[in-house]
Image: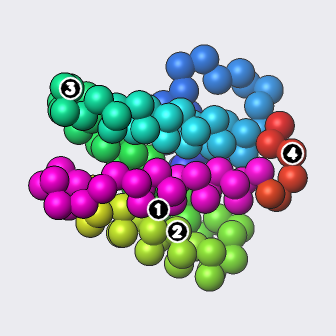
Amino acid sequence: MSATSQALRGYATNAASTRSDRRAEYEIIARVTQELRDRAVKQKSDFPAFVEALHNNQRLWTALVVDVADIKNPLPKELKARIVYLAEFTANHSRQVLKKKASVMPLLEINMAVLRGLKKEGPVT
């Protein structure tokens, strides 16, 4: 099992053991994205919960980078490089969001693009 799969499974509360790693990744990214979206809407009334959601999103991207850095990861080098770039962007942009100098929307859009990519590769089962 890859480092990402292990790290991402930590987010899952009731992940069934019969799910594929890709399905688990999809569900975890979807859950983190939904949490971030929901808490962004209420950030003025519950900023600590919004900060927690941003932190969870950052943990997700850190886990993805750890996974692509693994020499055993079979993804193409170009895709690995894109994931590292997106993780760096996510970290930098999250800091701007916390300073209230940027919108959370780009972070949500990136996560949604990853979800579309996971779906595009075939059924997520």
Q: Are marks 4 and 3 in contact (CB under 8 Å)?
A: no
Relative image position of residue 1 (x, y in whole percent) = 65, 45
**What stretch of residues is rendered in magenta?**
96-119
Location of residue 62 by image quarter: bottom left
**Label 3 – label 1 distance at C-alpha:** 29 Å
Location of residue 39 by image quarter: top left
5 or 30, nearer to the observer? 30
**Label 3 – label 2 distance at C-alpha:** 30 Å
**Label 4 – label 3 distance at C-alpha:** 37 Å
Quick one: SS at disc 1?
Answer: helix
Q: Nearer the viewer, mark 4 or mark 3?
A: 3
Quadrant where the image shows the C terminus: top right
Quick one: SS at disc 3?
Answer: loop
Q: Report which residue position mark 1 lands on.
A: 65
Q: Report which residue position mark 4 lands on.
A: 123
Q: Residue at x 46, y 62 (%)?
A: 65
